[in-house]
Image (cartoon, rainbow, N blue to C red):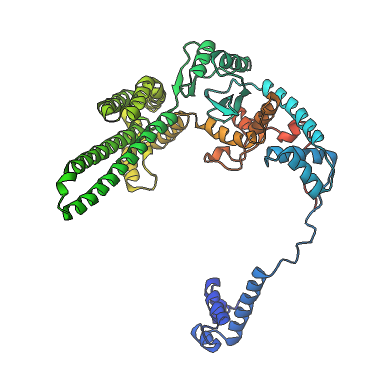
Amino acid sequence: MTTTTFPAAKLLSAQRIEPAIQAMAGAANVSHLASENNVSRKFVYQQKNRALEALNDAFAPSAADDEVLFYLPVTKAWLRQVSLALTLICHSSYRGVVEFMRDIVGVSVSEASVHNLHQLAAQRSAEFNQAQNLSEIRVGLHDEIFHCDEPVLVGVDAHSTYCYLLAAAPQREADTWAIHLLYACDQGFNPDYLVADQGTGLRAGQAIVWEGKPCHGDVFHILQQCESVANVLASVAQGAATRCQAMELKMDVAKQDGVGRTLARQLGMARRAQEQAALLAKDVKTLVQWLRRDVLELAGPCLATRVELFDFVTAELAKREHLDSKRIRPVRIALQNQRDDLLAFAGVLDDKLEAIALTHDLPTYLVRQACVLQRKSGTSPAYWQLWCRLCSQMGHKCHAVFEAVIKAMAQTPRCSSMVENLNSRLRNYFTLRRQLGGEYLSLLQFFLNHRTFLRSRVPERVGKSPKQLMTRQAHPHWLTLLGLGSPQPLRA
């Protein structure tokens, strides 16, 4: 078999592109390009023409805008599916559905028909919600949101994000929470512990249902409160610095007029106020950073050490309380009252790390170091240096230990952020209504629990619904579950 010896045949695709671009742009003579690449002028012209064709195809106006891509079978079932999907997926109003049907589909639909469809779907949704077994939920997240000054009680599974409680209530006192939690208990809801903020009615209601069951504190709200105070003190310090600069300018003018002594006392007071405000802002910012990055960080020391650090931060705030009692005192009192609840997650994590150490027959401090290592970026040299050191100490067990530690950390929630995320999605629906009926909330609860995630920071959730994550079983499309038929495939 003979081998081609033409130089042009030996050129790679990337080597063919450059002569074509230069010839097309007129940056070089075709004869010069042919000689430089050891090819014929005909070959250069061929590459130039191919590049021009590709460029014209890329920028040519689409001639297929009116071409029929596929046929969609429009049936009564399909119209019902679209009506419901427009409100739940696209957050449309009833009037928006009517307008879409009239202008796009060419079908006349009344608002009453859309309303009746949603009422029927809401009734079926309530049946599914009440029939769901909730015994798989190990950690529950509770919170309260408000719509038109009326509370809505929310409960979410920390692992699957399944919403097991979504109910409007006239009040949010202990009895109201207890009643709704008892309804959940009838469906098998009995978590190991709960996570919630410091709402008195919420916690009292839980105590009525489960006496002695732990309710961990939500670290998000307390950190937000602390950082808000730190930001305000920084603004106060900036204002003091601005006033001091203005006073210094006045002093310069007064010195030129020979009356500088009249402002000396005011300037001294302004400088002392600036120094005090700047030092206070710096100290409080440092304490808040310690609280966030060391004390309340998931990857951190053991519970006993965290308690000592927590008490140290609280004591340091108390020392500076007299400098700005109005702002610092509420934060200091909140930290003191919530310490055990806020640090409860650390005790849960300690137990898990000790169990990992016992399973793999390793010292607990090595497993703890594997946990603390997760604070560093996986792309930093420091991370891999410590990783290699730990692997040399653990031997062949290191990979299993690291996987177990990461899993234990992922299953130890510190805050009710899942509820906050759900609340942000619910507000897009609440804005369409002034009154939230129980049927409407049942429909939203069903829809959010059975729709699949298009994207998520947790890869395991992509393409799955909260119910599927909780039960570990697949289920039909939510439209099918509501008895509205399966989404119809497109016909080419």
Q: Quadrant of residue 323?
A: top left
Q: Residue 294: image x %, image y %?
A: 33, 33
- Residue pictured at 79% horizontal, 36% vertical: 111
Looking at the picture, tell me which residue is in the foreground, 131 or 45.
131
Viewed as shown, does residue 35 lie left or right of 186? Answer: left
Viewed as shown, does residue 246 lie left or right of 463? Answer: left
Viewed as shown, does residue 39 lie left or right of 388? Answer: right
Q: Residue 108: image x %, image y %?
A: 85, 43
Which residue is at the far bottom? 31
Q: Quadrant of residue 163?
A: top right
Q: Quadrant of residue 310?
A: top left
- Residue pictured at 53% horizontal, 71% vertical: 14
Quadrant into which the N terminus falls: bottom right
Depicted 305 relative to depicted 85: above or below: above
Instruction: Note whether residue 5 is visible.
Output: no
Q: Residue 22: image x %, image y %?
A: 53, 80
Looking at the picture, tell me which residue is in the foreground, 52 or 270.
270
- Residue pictured at 77% horizontal, 45% vertical: 99
Instruction: Note whether residue 379 is visible.
Output: yes
Depicted 487 relative to depicted 14: above or below: above
Looking at the picture, tell me which residue is in the foreground, 379 or 57.
57
Q: Residue 5: image x %, image y %?
A: 55, 81
